[in-house]
Amino acid sequence: MYSIIVVPPPTTEDETDRAQLRLAPGERLSFGRSGDNDLRIGHDGVSRRAGEITAHGTFWALSNLSSHQTYVVENPEGAGEHIKVAPGRLDAPVPFEFSRIVLPAAGDLLPLEVWAPRHDYVHCEANPAGGTTAPAFSVDRTKRYFAVLAALCEPRLRGDPHAPLPTVDQVVERLRPAWPAASRTSVQWNIDYLAVKLRLKPGPEEADTGPRLNGKKESLVSLALRFDLVREDDLVVLTAPSGRAVR
């Protein structure tokens, strides 16, 4: 059974070389400029033997055989999520379902796509013994605070991982279709509420004599994207009517 699919970069000499390459668990695929690689990348800026991909059951590993160049493996769906594989590193595990190896090549950045569509999940018992585990982050997607969080995350979820976060005024305008009464005060209140709810600052009943939390919006967005509290599918709340505000 194949578990890994490799899509060559568009710089190979023959377009037919771009056919998908499929690897079963345990199989390896070498890539580089030399013709004795499994995948030849005909670019002068690519090492003769640049790297090797090893397929496993539900993930894959990358060996960087370059002596001086770091490779970056991006998650195109992860709002900037990536890992770096240092020169000479062997079998670095890559957990992303969709990945893009970025090969720096004499001023060019060559994308080598790797897909790992196979997923295995544990089958939970219908009625496990003992009490249920409390969720790490409890959010209600029908509440207005979630719409505010989605609006803050939207630029980076739309594919620009380094996009500046929207201002409060921009969030207000973005929420108007679903929340006509949105205002600076209500949006700022919900941002403060999120900071408490997601435990980024103490609640109002706790002593908070320190300085005001800096970068509150940045901290909220970073946490939300890191733990998938907001996904691209959730952006529908910015156009659909939201529930009552949690005030």
Image: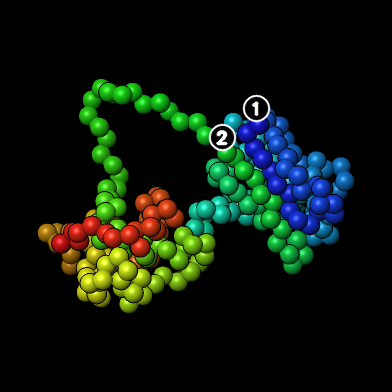
Q: Sequence-wise, which precedes: disc 2 or disc 1?
A: 1
The answer to whether residue 82 is above or below residue 5 is below
Depth order, front residue of 49/109: 109
In the rendered structure, the answer to whether residue 159 lies left or right of residue 125 reads: right
| Crowding at mark 1 (Cα within 10 Å: few <14, some 14-19, many 20+) | few
User: CB atoms at circles 2 and 1 under 8 Å apart?
Assistant: yes
Element assignment for label 2: loop
The answer to whether residue 86 is above or below residue 208 is above
Which residue in the structure is indicated by mark 2? 118
Q: Residue at x 65, y 35 (%)?
A: 55
Q: Residue at x 80, y 40 (%)?
A: 38
Query: Dividing the picture into quarters, in which one does residue 39 lie?
Result: top right
Q: How is the image coloured?
A: rainbow
Depth order, front residue of 27/156: 156
Q: Is residue 9 visible?
A: yes
Look at label 2 and name its amino acid.
Answer: Arg
Residue 168, given in percent of the width and then of the height, sits at 32, 74
Residue 175, given in percent of the width and then of the height, sits at 32, 68
Q: Residue at x 72, y 58 (%)?
A: 110
Which residue in the structure is indicated by mark 1? 1
In the rendered structure, the answer to whether residue 54 lies left or right of residue 220 reads: right
Residue at the farthest left position? 205
Q: Quadrant of the N terminus?
A: top right
Depth order, front residue of 82/125: 125
Depth order, front residue of 118/55: 118
Q: Residue at x 67, y 40 (%)?
A: 5
Look at label 1 and name its amino acid.
Answer: Met
Q: Is residue 199 visible?
A: no
How far is disc 2 from disc 1 in space, using C-alphas? 10 Å
